[in-house]
Image: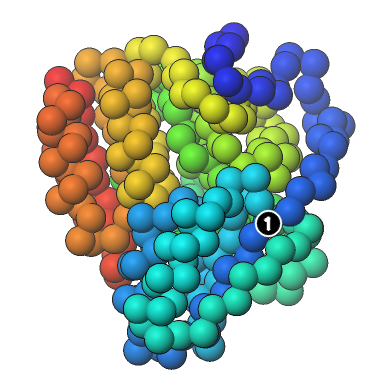
Amino acid sequence: MHKGIGYKQYFEPCINENSSPTRLLMTHKIVRFEVPATLSDAVSNALHHLPFDTILEDDTGLTTSLPTEQWSTEIELAVRLVAEAFGVALRISEEIAKDYNAVWEQSFEPYSFDDFCSVRASFHPPSAVHKYELVIDPRMAFGTGHHETTDLMIGAMRDYPFDGKCVVDFGAGTGILGILATKMGAAKTYYYENDPTACVNLRENILLNETADTAIVIENTHDTLLPSEVDFMLVNITRNVILAYLKEIVQAVATGGLLNFSGFVLKDADVVLAEGTKLGLTAMKQDSKGEWSFLQMMKR
C-alpha cells in the first residue's frame, strides 16, 4: 500500500460497508460576485488562475469558495482586483461547511452518458439500462457528471481497457472518475484530494459503490508523492493546479500511459498542451464542450 510524505491515508483493509467516516468541522471562505449575465463568462475566466475548484453560476451572479486554511491575503487581493476590474459588487464571508444533502435531494437529477454510464444519488431509483451505474452523493465535493468537464472526461474513458490497470484520480472531488475506472476493471485506483471535507464525501462514495477494496484515498496536505508506473492519469482540475503539479504527474506515468486533462477553458488548452509537450507528452485527442476544454496525451 502506497504511503506518501505529506499525506494522510484513509482506506485500510478493515473498512467495510458499515463504516461511517467522521465528519469534519471546518470553515470556508465564500466569495460572491453580483454579476450580470453578460459578464459571467468573463469574470469566471478571470478567476481561473486562482485555486478555486469550481465556480457556480446563478441568475444574479457567481459563487465560489475555498477552505479557510487555504485562504491568503494574496488571494483576497486578486479577488478584489477582479471585482474592481469589472465594476461588480463583491462579498466575502466565512461559514462552517454544511451538509448539502437536503439541497441535492431537491435539485440533483440523475446524469447519463448514452447507455454507457449513469450517475445517480443514493435517493434515486437504480437504472437497469446503463452498462455502469455510479452512486454519488456530492455534498460539498465536485463531480456529478453534469459539468461539461466531467462529461468530457467520462466520454473519453469509454473505450479504454482498464482491466488490471493502475489509475490515479488527481483532484478527485466526489471520486466519480476513479470509481468509474474501478468499475471498468482497474486493479488499483489512487484518489488524491486536498480538501478534508471533500475527502470525507469521497470515502463515502467509494463505500456506496463497493469499490473500497482497490481504493487508496490520499489527502494532500503538503508535498506531492505519486505512485510510479501509473497506466492512466485522470486530472480534472483548474489550469493553475495542473501546471503546478504537471512535472510530478508526468513522472508518475508509465511509458505508453495516458493522461486525460480537463477543468480549464478553451483559451488555456494551448498552455497545457505546450507544457505537457515540453515534458515528453504527445497529444492524442482534443475536445471541448461549451467553453471547456479536454486534452488527452500519451507519455512516450
Q: Return the residue nearer the eye: 161 or 147.
A: 147
Q: Quadrant of residue 24?
A: top right
Question: As drawn, which residue projects farthest toward the top?
Answer: 1
Which SS class for mark 1?
strand
Residue 238 lies, in percent from the top left, at 39, 50
Query: Which residue sits at x=66%, y=51%?
Result: 68
Above/below status of 275 relative to 150: above
Q: Quadrant of the C terminus?
A: top left
Query: Which residue sits at x=70%, y=24%?
Result: 10
Crowding at dot 1, Cα within 10 Å, few <14 / some 14-19 / many 20+, comes out as some
Residue 9 lies, in percent from the top left, at 66, 21
| Residue under pointer 1 | 28
Q: Is residue 267 left or right of residue 165?
A: left
Q: Is residue 1 left or right of residue 268?
A: right
Any part of residue 157 in sight: no
Q: Quadrant of residue 147?
A: bottom left
Q: Return the residue nearer the eye: 230 or 280.
A: 280
Query: Which residue sits at x=73%, y=74%?
Result: 106
Residue 16 lies, in percent from the top left, at 80, 25
Above/below status of 202 relative to 100: above
Q: Quadrant of the N terminus?
A: top right
Residue 159 lies, in percent from the top left, at 31, 39
The amino acid type of the residue labelled 1 equals: His
